[in-house]
Image (tube, rainbow, N blue to C red):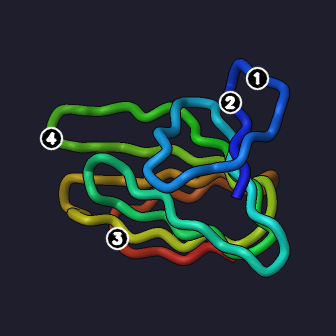
């Protein structure tokens, strides 16, 4: 897995426990996958040869929201507490918002 910081031009090797920030990009290569665990406990799993961008995370009263942009590949998402969390996934063709376990392909 590689990470490209929002303010950087280089793809850096990702390390376990590495913090990700708004507008960082994450990619996996063929034959590899990765998991991103958000502070509220939600998990996003990237399949092989995927590319995503971490969009803005906007807390609302009583609701934690995470936004991702999937540019390429497969993303599986599981919310730790769907009653208080939501996930918005944008692709080049659509935007999906959910408050439950979801799978995007």
Q: Earlier in the sequence, mark 1 or mark 3?
A: 1
Q: Which residue is the site of mark 1?
A: 8
Q: Could you say which is closer to the camera, residue 19 or residue 70?
A: 19
Q: Earlier in the sequence, mark 2 or mark 3?
A: 2
Q: Residues within 10 Å of mark 2 (few under 14, many from 20)?
A: some
Residue 2 place in picture, x, y as percent: 73, 51
Q: Which residue is the site of mark 2?
A: 5
In the picture, measured across the screen, residue 101 lies left or right of residue 1, that is: left
Label disc, if present, on residue 100 of the rendered structure? 3
Is label 2 in a helix, a strand or a loop? loop
Q: Residues within 10 Å of mark 3 (few under 14, many from 20)?
A: some
| Residues tagged 1 and 2 counted as in contact (Cβ below 8 A) | yes
Residue 74 place in picture, x, y as percent: 70, 73
In the picture, measured across the screen, residue 104 lies left or right of residue 80, that is: right
Within the image, what quadrant is residue 81 found in? bottom left
Q: Could you say which is closer to the camera, residue 92 or residue 26?
A: 26
| Residues tagged 2 and 3 counted as in contact (Cβ below 8 A) | no
Is label 4 in a helix, a strand or a loop? loop
Within the image, what quadrant is residue 78 found in? bottom left
Residue name at image x 40 percent, y 57 percent: 37
Q: Relative to residue 65, is residue 70 depicted above or below?
A: below
Residue 103 place in picture, x, y as percent: 55, 77
Residue name at image x 39 percent, y 75 percent: 101
Q: Which residue is the site of mark 4?
A: 62
Within the image, what quadrant is residue 3 found in? top right
Q: Earlier in the sequence, mark 2 or mark 4?
A: 2
Discs 1/4, front: 1
Is label 3 in a helix, a strand or a loop? loop
């Amino acid at each position: 897995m590689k990470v490209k910081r929002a303010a950087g031009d280089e793809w850096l090797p990702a390390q376990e426990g590495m913090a990700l920030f708004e507008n960082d990009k994450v990619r996996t290569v063929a034959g590899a996958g990765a998991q991103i665990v958000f502070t509220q406990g939600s998990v996003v799993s990237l399949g092989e040869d995927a590319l995503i961008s971490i969009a803005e995370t906007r807390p609302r009263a009583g609701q934690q929201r995470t936004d991702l942009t999937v540019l390429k590949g497969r993303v599986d998402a599981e919310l730790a507490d769907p009653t208080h969390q939501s996930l918005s996934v944008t692709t080049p063709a659509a935007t999906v918002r959910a408050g439950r376990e979801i799978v995007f392909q």
